[in-house]
Amino acid sequence: MLPDLIVVTDLDATLLDHFDYSYSAAEPALQKLKVLGIPLVLNSSKTIAEMQGIRQLLKLDAPFIVENGAGLLVPEGASLKEYNLGMNRAELLSVIHDLRQTHGFKFTGFADMQPALLAELTGLSEAGAKLAMQRNFTEALSWEDSDAQLQLFREKLQQAGLSLVRGGRFFHVSSAADKGKAVSFLRQYYQREGRTPRFIALGDSENDLPMLAVAEYAVLVKSPVRDFPDFEHPALRRTSEYGPAGWNQAVTSLLNELKENSE
């Protein structure tokens, strides 16, 4: 018998292809999770509006985590209960815009963009870009300055109680929330329901590492645009395939191994 497994995953360049956002290569493993009744929790920098569409497409009913761990949404009947784990975005924008004016940092945030520009940068449709811009807790930005200025920006954000992490395409500014803290909060939620969950976590970027760190099984999915981030975990595996093909590879092999070990 398998342990009480929950799969928690990043989206872009992990479950979704980096270039065309397809998940077709992961369909065999997705189907296997459904047959086994294993919840699939999405944990992404994406917004609530974006995640709702993806959840409907994948026919998911599990909780989901948005904006790099700043929000957790749990289905309760026909509605969603929202847990705010981060800072109000208006307060956050005030801080980073003041820093830009004071220190001359060069970046373009989502708050500075029109949907057409974001669509051009990401390959999203303009409608999809509008959903990506409906942020509640965080700001994503394209860095256009030097590495030295980036380090100074990071330090100034830390002094203000904020953090900067690199995602698949953008840097993300948030409060003390992160993907790992959100998974730990979710673990406690399941434990209150009398469950003893064991998490399989999959991601590809720096902002996924806190999530992988708190999981029992950690998977770094190979990215087509950067090397694996530095990371250590007692049950870490790295995929040889990119994106959803690697995701499919890792989830399938892990489930098979765990089934064999439980027999």
Image (cartoon, rainbow, N blue to C red):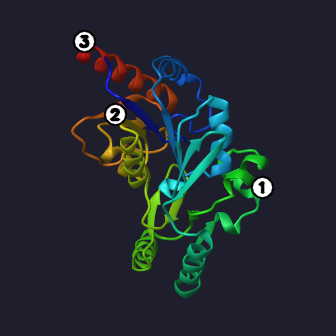
- Which residue is located at x 76 percent, y 57 percent? 115
Whether residue 35 is visible here, answered yes or no, is yes
Q: Which amino acid does label 1 sit on?
A: Ala
User: What secondary structure is found at the residue carrying circle 1?
Assistant: helix
Question: Looking at this rendering, what residue extends furthest in the bottom direction?
Answer: 102
- Residues under numbered marks 1 and 2 in contact, where contact means CB atoms less than 8 Å apart: no
Task: Give the side of residue 170 with respect to residue 131, left or right.
Answer: left
**Spot occupied by residue 138 in the image (x, y as percentages of width and height):** 56, 63
User: What secondary structure is found at the residue carrying circle 3?
Assistant: loop
Few, some or many residues within 10 Å of mark 3 (<14, 14–19, 20+): few
**Spot occupied by residue 33 in the image (x, y as percentages of width and height):** 48, 22
Disc 2 target residue: 238
Q: In which quadrant of the rendered image does the N terminus lie?
A: top left
In the rendered view, tell whether residue 59 sits above or below residue 77: above
Residue 116 is marked as 1
Q: Which of marks 3 and 2 is in front?
A: 3
Kindly report the distance in space between the C-alpha atoms of the residues bearing marks 3 and 2: 26 Å
Viewer-closest of 99 and 253 = 253
| Corner quadrant of residue 54 | top right
In the rendered view, tell whether residue 142 sits above or below residue 239: below
- Which residue is located at x 34 percent, y 33 percent? 238
In the rendered view, tell whether residue 180 sits above or below residue 219: below
**Spot occupied by residue 118 in the image (x, y as percentages of width and height):** 70, 55
Kindly report the distance in space between the C-alpha atoms of the residues bearing marks 1 and 3: 54 Å
- Which residue is located at x 53 percent, y 41 percent? 63
Task: Give the side of residue 210 with respect to residue 92, left or right.
Answer: left
| Corner quadrant of residue 140 | bottom right
Kindly report the distance in space between the C-alpha atoms of the residues bearing marks 1 and 2: 35 Å
Tag 2 or tag 3, which sits nearer the N-term? 2
Disc 3 target residue: 263
